[in-house]
Image (spheres, helix red, strand yellow):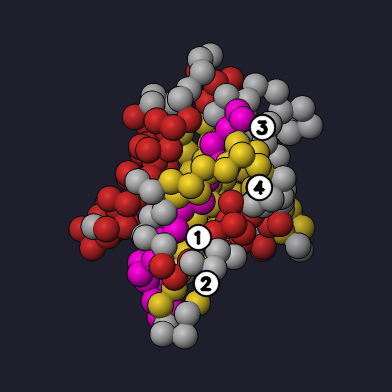
């Protein structure tokens, strides 16, 4: 594993994206930082992390797909790889909150942000950003957040976690034709609150329903109280829990 270790950086994703040697960096090059001042999550959220306590990393992925293929495949592969890696560390009640948050019980412990660079030759370079709460204990102002240490009552080796996660991502992406079916199955099976009556918020109001899965376009499928199966894109729905 080729790893670039940084002390403090605005964003590990931005560091990789702006690297003048990006086209020459080996596949699965990893950048880690002890502190990130401008971390980002889904929906434009800010990822706040206590310096030195958590795993902040970005992984370079090239030649996984072209512009003609479904980018949600990479979200599935990475989410399942992270979930599987954490299973090896016996983190309890793991789930994937659509599209790519990592949960333990009702607490968010990690988030994934994938950014794609489209090349003129139709290939795509992907920057896979991962923030994982590891040894931080206090999350004042973030009631839905927690960490591996807070949940398991022990400290964790961030480097061991990183190596396990990167190893599984590399394995799954390098063997995607063989791993695709099982990854899709696991992603659907591990969805947070799947089949559990829940409340949802949309731009048009709130409603009750239950998650049934994610369709081939990466949209969340929810069956509402009128037995209608509805599909939503990322900015169209929010799970309230």
The correct choice, above or below, for 49 with respect to 178 in the image is above
Would you say residue 60 sits in the magenta stretch?
yes
Residue at the spot of label 1: 127
Q: Earlier in the sequence, mark 3 or mark 1?
A: 3
**61 horizontally vs 208: left or right:** left
On residue 9, the disc is 4
Q: Are marks 2 and 4 in contact (CB under 8 Å)?
A: no
Is mark 1 in CB contact (under 8 Å) with mark 2?
Answer: yes
Residue where numbered disc 3 is placed: 51
* Secondary-structure class at tag 1: strand
Observer-side mark, 2 or 4, equals: 4
Q: Whole-percent x and y of residue 206? A: 73, 53
User: Secondary structure under badge 4?
Assistant: strand
How far is disc 4 from disc 1 in space, using C-alphas?
A: 16 Å
Query: Is residue 37 in the magenta section?
Result: no
136 displayed left or right of 119:
right
């Amino acid at each position: 594993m080729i790893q670039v270790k940084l002390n403090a950086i605005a964003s590990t994703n931005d560091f990789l994206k702006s690297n003048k040697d990006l086209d020459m960096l080996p596949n699965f090059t990893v950048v880690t930082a002890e502190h990130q001042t401008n971390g980002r999550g889904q929906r434009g959220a800010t990822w706040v992390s206590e310096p030195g306590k958590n795993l902040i990393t970005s992984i370079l992925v090239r030649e996984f797909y072209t512009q003609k293929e479904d980018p949600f495949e990479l979200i599935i592969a990475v989410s399942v790889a992270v979930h599987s890696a954490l299973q090896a560390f016996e983190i309890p009640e793991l789930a994937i909150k659509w599209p790519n948050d990592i949960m333990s019980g009702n607490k968010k412990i990690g988030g994934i942000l994938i950014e794609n660079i489209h090349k003129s030759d139709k290939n795509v370079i992907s920057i896979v950003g991962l923030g994982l709460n590891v040894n931080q204990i206090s999350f004042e102002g973030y009631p839905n957040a927690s960490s591996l240490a807070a949940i398991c009552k022990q400290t964790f080796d961030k480097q061991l976690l990183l190596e396990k996660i990167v190893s599984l991502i590399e394995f799954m992406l390098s063997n995607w034709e063989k791993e695709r079916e099982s990854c899709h199955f696991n992603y659907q099976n591990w969805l947070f609150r799947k089949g559990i009556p829940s409340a949802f918020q949309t731009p048009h109001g709130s409603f009750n329903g239950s998650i049934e899965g994610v369709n081939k376009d990466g949209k969340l499928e929810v069956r509402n109280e009128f037995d209608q199966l509805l599909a939503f894109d990322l900015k169209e729905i929010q799970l309230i829990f």
